[in-house]
Image (spheres, helix red, strand yellow):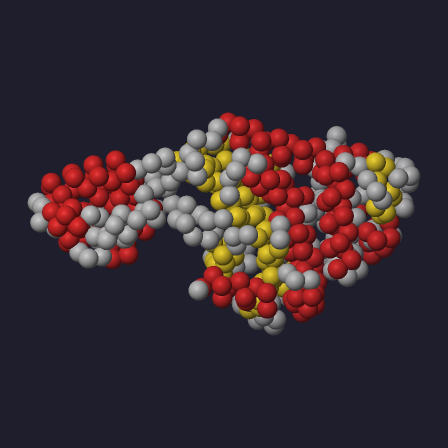
């Protein structure tokens, strides 16, 4: 079910525009294009509640722009405040042209939720058409790659016992080519054929009756996985080496869905937006305050929502993979949903989460999973070699209470410095 809304760019309750302009009136540029007439209205309405003296503000050098004609500035500086406010409101409102609008869309998809925030610079785009385009993009991705839909393209491929080349859609071929690229570059730790192991450990479409499988069962499942060994990609085709080979796309399809939504809204001429599906996201342009989009990276604490780091992500896809939300415990042992492709078992190293910024959300999604499987020690080297911005958070070993240390690679540090400037 879609939920949609459209708001004026500086509405009194959107993105705290009024609070930003009221926190320090010395920073207000009242008659510049960076502050709309509606923001000024919000400032005027709420200023008394914030303890701001409007007469002082309007008569100060900081409040009076040089863009006002000299005679008007001379008169305004001497007018009674009641008359002053009335005239200023009429002046500013008459100067307001078409107003940009903030568009928001959201709903459920791929077993999680999605949210879109986009800025309609013209203020006249058809919200229903954009809504329909987003729905169509998500429908295409799910029809092709949803492992929980038995009628999807990937489910039908998995169910087939044929070892002959099977024609696949251009969309699936594109995603599988990216999966193959990350698989090779990550020393095999990103592996779209881990389905048998994911199911065996109870993290797939069904819950295993016995959460901890036997060594024999793990060995048997390992014989069916290994993307480079059991799966062959051709020109528009995909071929199994074993009838029981299956492809599991949860670690890359969400990111691709984010990119498809981004493409859909860009087709309407939208240049400033943030798209998110289940924590995977992409951002372009600026947020409603005219600044780069900023996203917080969570501390890897179960049940917590503390922010570890804030990063500017405009122009990037971003994804975080962690071991602290999807796991189970048995006999005092914690088993993560991230499977080591070499051992067939959940990871045991101390890396708790990895955040990746890449050229698009699909690659960020896949690489976040791969680098978490690798751990921060190997992951640092591989991420830098592949030009990825990566941020690792790992647990300090041997402590009774969890203590975390963060580690950003060179590319990520550069982005942090850029955001601080």
What quarter of the picture does the N terminus occupy? top right
Tell me where residue 357 sits by quadrant. Answer: bottom right
For this view, does 363 lie left or right of residue 9?
right
Please report the residue visible at 57 percent of the width from the left and 47 percent of the height from the top: 281
Q: Residue at x 58, y 41 (%)?
A: 262
Viewer-nearest residue: 256 or 209: 256
Q: In the rendering, at what x and y percent does residue 135 appear?
A: 59, 31
The number of numbered badges drawn on the structure is 0
Tell me the residue at 57%/67% (across/down).
Answer: 408
x and y percent of residue 46 in the render?
Answer: 23, 44
Residue that lies at the very extreme toward the bottom in this rendered image: 398
Q: Position of residue 118 (x, y in %)?
A: 48, 40
Instruction: Residue at the far front: name it.
Output: 70
Q: Nearer the viewer, residue 406 or 65?
A: 65
Q: Quadrant of the C terminus?
A: bottom left
* Residue 136 shown left or right of residue 17 in the figure: right
Residue 313 appears in view: yes
Going 61% across and 62% down the picture, which residue do you hit? 390
Residue 49, given in percent of the width and then of the height, sits at 20, 47
**241 and 103: which is toward the camera:** 103
Along the horizontal axis of the image, is 175 left or right of 404?
A: right
Q: Is residue 404 visible?
A: no
């Amino acid at each position: 079910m879609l939920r949609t809304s459209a708001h004026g760019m500086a509405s009194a309750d959107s993105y705290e525009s009024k609070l930003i302009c009221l926190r320090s009136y010395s920073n207000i540029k009242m008659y510049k294009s960076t502050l709309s007439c509606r923001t000024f209205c919000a400032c005027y309405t709420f200023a008394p509640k914030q303890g701001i003296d409007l007469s002082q503000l309007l008569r100060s050098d900081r409040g009076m722009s040089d863009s006002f004609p000299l005679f008007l500035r001379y008169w305004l500086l001497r007018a009674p405040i009641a008359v002053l406010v009335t005239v200023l409101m009429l002046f500013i409102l008459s100067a307001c042209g078409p107003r940009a609008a903030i568009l928001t869309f959201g709903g459920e998809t791929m077993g999680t939720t999605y949210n879109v925030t986009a800025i309609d610079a013209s203020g006249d785009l058809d919200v229903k058409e954009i809504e329909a385009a987003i729905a169509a993009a998500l429908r295409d991705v799910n029809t092709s790659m949803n492992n929980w839909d038995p009628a999807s393209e990937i489910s039908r491929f998995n169910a087939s016992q044929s070892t002959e080349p099977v024609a696949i859609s251009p969309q699936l071929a594109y995603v599988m080519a990216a999966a193959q690229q990350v698989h090779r570059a990550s020393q095999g730790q990103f592996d779209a054929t881990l389905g048998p192991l994911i199911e065996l450990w109870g993290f797939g479409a069904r819950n295993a009756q016995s959460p901890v499988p036997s060594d024999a069962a793990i060995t048997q499942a390992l014989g069916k996985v290994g993307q480079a060994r059991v799966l062959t990609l051709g020109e528009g085709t995909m071929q199994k080496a074993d009838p029981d080979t299956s492809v599991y796309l949860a670690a890359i399809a969400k990111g691709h869905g984010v990119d498809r939504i981004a493409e859909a809204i860009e087709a309407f001429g939208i240049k400033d937006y943030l798209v998110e599906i289940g924590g995977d996201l992409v951002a372009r342009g600026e947020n409603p305050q005219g600044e780069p989009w900023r996203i917080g990276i969570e501390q890897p604490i179960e049940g917590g929502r503390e922010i570890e780091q804030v990063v500017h992500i405009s122009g990037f896809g971003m994804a975080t993979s962690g071991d602290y939300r999807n796991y189970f415990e048995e006999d005092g042992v914690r088993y993560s949903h991230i499977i080591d492709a070499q051992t067939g078992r959940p990871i045991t190293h101390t890396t708790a989460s990895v955040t990746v910024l890449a050229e698009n959300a699909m690659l960020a999604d896949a690489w976040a999973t791969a680098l978490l499987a690798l751990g921060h020690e190997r992951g640092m080297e591989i991420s830098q070699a592949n030009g990825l911005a990566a941020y690792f958070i790992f647990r300090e070993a041997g402590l009774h209470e969890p203590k975390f240390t963060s580690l950003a690679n060179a590319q990520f540090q550069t982005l942090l410095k850029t955001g601080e400037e």
